[in-house]
């Protein structure tokens, strides 16, 4: 039986950057009954957010979410009037560099985050309040992270419909190198090599090519910032893929099939509000689905 | 203006193997008004085809389509009563080996084919009469191929809703190595390497990983037969992908994006019924869409 959290008002949320990710998050939180403010340098993005119930202002507090591209992250709060006690989190696709820049300036008030959502589309025209529903949302628990602030950031992710994966920034960057950044490089290499093969090959391209190269359609500037911002882990993960490609093909195909079709199942668990226990949940492949009074509820693989 | 082909009855079609590809082709041709017979070693596949209007018999003639897995191709006609003047074509995913086995036995009566269609599903339960609609269908024009028989096989593909790409078997195998066989190996390597990275990485896996590994869910026996049946061209295409991965990442990402987002357009052309002219159409990335009296109509990239 779940013990509900004692009713206390959740803090307001302020979203900086109202493009696809920030605009979608703001809209999802408005729909979930949260008080949401927001700002974007683009007046059209501000107008679109206002039409969805977001209060447009440069005065932000509570949980402030940085939803700007990686190169703009360090200066995202410049010129804004942010409550000095606000918890600050972000949606950037790499975490060690953001922790080193934004995190260093904010100390224990910063909680790095990364929702595993988004499409090749971008901008406020691509806003979708359902974007985070069922998505995994990595949230960093560093040795210096204030656990109460981490829980406030986690509640933002949960209210948007996501499941929260507790991680360290280093663990996160290693993991996304393997499952996001290297796939972008492979898609580019596959497309570029097929281009060398010529027009006949491209004319015959069918499902496996279209799927394997879909993310090569993403904005190159975004992809380059992502892989170069996580260069070490991405190079290591790419080396693991190259080593796999050296195996005899029957072994390689069987190994890939086994991983792709594995279904570890889900088993509901309760985890105390404790850094080590939360990180252990993430390392087993589990996620938090609910905050309760003295613990979180989540799941781990298993039956 | 199109000159229609003088009305003459098209030959009957006999389909050997009534699984996903053969069953879908038979159903599409019945819907297009062709007379279709078929056979499968599995009584359940025969019954499913009969329910779609296919005459189930071991006596086959006209254009006989071999729709069996690659390892069964050489023996596909064993025990069947096939008209000695029938044109024989196939749907196998590699062409040089099939040409060397089936083609050598049948001489000028054999026209190798490969529709770029199909899903991870298989068997007669996955039959879909729309499977070939808009798909490219490679059809081999070797020096010894009888052009009239090639046109009969092309009409089968066109009647199923496909566009016909004239190729040599060698050109085909090089092209599909780049756009189908290597993508299967990359998907397997990506999945296997992510499996090494551990449960946290797999728990964070999102769109780019799911797309990049989708074909790793295919039946491993099918994939292994495919890549080992086209080992030389696949190894060469894989080497080209590896060379792309050695480039600086910004160059790689930009090159992949350019190929993935290129839209060469389509320009309607007429091509005489001549081997060299048809192969030239295929090499420019074009395809045949219609057979006319003294030529075919098709398209090539361009505006």
Image (spheres, coloured by chain):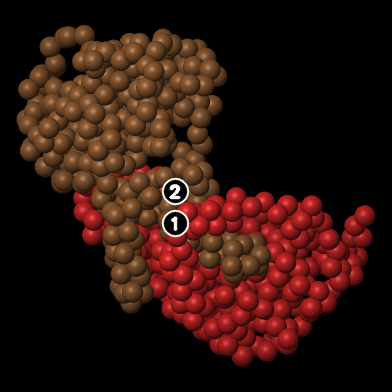
Chain colours: A brown, B red
Contact between labelled residues 2 and 1, with CB atoms less than 8 Å apart: yes
Residue underneath mark 1: B249
Tell me if residue A127 can be seen.
Answer: yes
Q: Residues within 10 Å of mark 2 (few under 14, many from 20)?
A: many
- What residue sits 50% from the left and 34% below the top? A122
Residue occupied by mark 2: A224
Q: Secondary structure at mark 2?
A: helix
Please tell me whether residue B218 is drawn above or below residue A223 in the rendered image. Answer: below
The picture places residue A267, in percent across and down from the top left corner, at: 16, 40
Residue B169 left/right relative to A140:
right
Q: What residue is rendered at 50% in x and 57% in y?
A: B251
Q: Nearer the viewer, residue B138 or A143?
A: A143
Q: Is residue B9 left or right of residue B91?
A: right
Q: Residue at x 79, y 78 (%)?
A: B276
- Name above or below for residue A27 compared with residue B272: above
Q: Position of residue A73 (x, y in %)?
A: 36, 32
B107 or A58, nearer to the observer: A58
Q: Is residue A28 visible?
A: no
Rendering quarter of residue A298: top left
């Amino acid at each position: 039986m779940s013990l509900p959290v004692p009713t206390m008002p959740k803090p307001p949320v302020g979203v900086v950057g109202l493009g696809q990710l920030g605009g979608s998050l703001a809209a999802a939180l408005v729909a979930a009954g949260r008080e949401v403010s927001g700002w974007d340098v683009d007046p059209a993005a501000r107008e679109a957010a206002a039409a969805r119930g977001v209060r447009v202002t440069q005065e932000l507090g509570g949980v402030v979410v940085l939803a700007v591209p990686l190169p703009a992250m360090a200066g995202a709060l410049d010129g804004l009037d942010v409550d000095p006690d606000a918890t600050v989190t972000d949606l950037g696709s790499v975490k060690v560099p953001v922790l080193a820049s934004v995190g260093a300036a904010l100390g224990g008030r910063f909680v790095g985050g990364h929702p595993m959502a988004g499409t090749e589309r971008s901008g406020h025209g691509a806003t979708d309040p359902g974007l985070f529903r069922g998505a995994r949302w990595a949230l960093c628990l560093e040795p210096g992270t204030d656990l109460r602030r981490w829980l406030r950031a986690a509640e933002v992710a949960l209210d948007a419909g996501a499941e929260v994966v507790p991680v360290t920034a280093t663990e996160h960057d290693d993991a996304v190198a393997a499952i996001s950044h290297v796939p972008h490089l492979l898609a580019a290499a596959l497309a570029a090599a097929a281009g060398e093969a010529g027009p006949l090959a491209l004319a015959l391209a069918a499902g496996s090519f279209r799927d394997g190269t879909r993310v090569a359609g993403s904005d190159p500037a975004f992809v380059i910032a992502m892989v170069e911002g996580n260069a070490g882990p991405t190079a290591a993960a790419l080396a693991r893929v190259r080593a796999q490609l050296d195996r005899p093909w029957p072994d390689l195909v069987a190994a890939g099939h086994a991983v792709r079709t594995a279904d570890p199942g889900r088993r509901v668990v309760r985890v105390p509000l404790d850094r080590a226990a939360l990180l252990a949940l993430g390392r087993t492949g589990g996620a938090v689905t609910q905050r309760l009074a003295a613990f979180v509820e989540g799941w781990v693989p298993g039956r």
